[in-house]
Image (tube, rainbow, N blue to C red):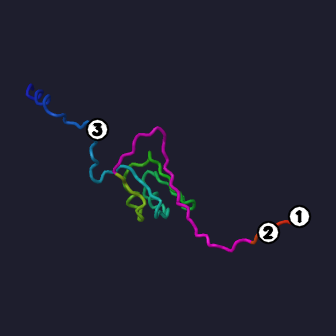
Amino acid sequence: MIKNVLKNLFSPPATRPFPRERRPAAANVRGTVEFTNEGCTYCSACALKCPTDAITVDRTAKTLDFDVFRCIACNCCVEACKKGCVQMSAAYRGPVYDRPLLHHEAAPVVEAIEASEPEAEAPAATQT
C-alpha cells in the first residue's frame, strides 16, 4: 500500500484540469441540432420524424419552431431532411435559466422592382 501512495504522490494527476484543458469531442458525437433557413422548403419532414415533437413547422407562414428541452438528440430530423438544412453539431448547449424556443422564419423574398415611368407630377397651383 505504501508503494501505491508514493507512486501517486510523485506522478501527475490522472484527470485533466477541466477549466484550463477541455477534452476534445469524440467522432460522431450528438451535441445539438442546428437549423439553417437557406434552402429550407418547410416540407415538415423533420417534424414528422421527430419522436418527441420538438419541431413544429407551419408551411403557410413558413416558420419552424424548435423546443430545445424536448429534443433528445436522436438524429432522426437530420436523416429526414433531404435539403441538408438540419445538422447535428458536436458542441453541447450550455445551461439556461428559462425555456428557450428557437424560432426560424423564411427569409423575405426580395422581388426585383422594374423601373416604371415616373408618375406625372400634378401642376403647381397658381395664385391670382
First in residue order: circle 2 vs circle 1: 2
What residue is pinned by disc 3? Answer: 20
Taking the magenta stretch, the answer to whether it contains residue 117 is yes
Taking the magenta stretch, the answer to whether it contains residue 127 is no
> In the drawing, does residue 90 fall left or right of residue 97?
left
What residue is pinned by disc 1? Answer: 127
Nearest the eye: 20 or 123: 123
Callout 2: few (<14), some (14-19), or many (20+) C-alpha neighbours within 10 Å? few
- Which one is closest to the eye, mark 2 or mark 1? 1
Q: Amino acid at mark 2?
A: Ala
Is mark 2 in CB contact (under 8 Å) with mark 1? Answer: no
Q: Quadrant of residue 123?
A: bottom right
Q: CA distance from mark 2 to mark 1?
A: 15 Å
Q: Quadrant of residue 94?
A: top left
- Which residue sits at x=41%, y=40%? 95
> In the drawing, does residue 25 fall left or right of residue 105?
left
Residue 122, label in figure: 2
Q: Amino acid at mark 1?
A: Gln
Q: Amino acid at mark 3?
A: Arg
Q: Position of residue 116 (x, y in %)?
A: 66, 73
Nearest the eye: 63 or 111: 111
Instruction: Point out the residue furthest to the top here.
Output: 2
The quadrant of the picture occupied by the C terminus is bottom right
Q: Position of residue 79 (x, y in %)?
A: 37, 60
Q: Is residue 115 above or below residue 68?
A: below
Is mark 2 in CB contact (under 8 Å) with mark 3? Answer: no
First in residue order: circle 3 vs circle 1: 3
- Which residue sits at x=27%, y=53%? 27
Residue range (magenta): 90-119
Q: Determine whether the residue tagged by mark 1 lies in a helix, strand or loop.
A: loop
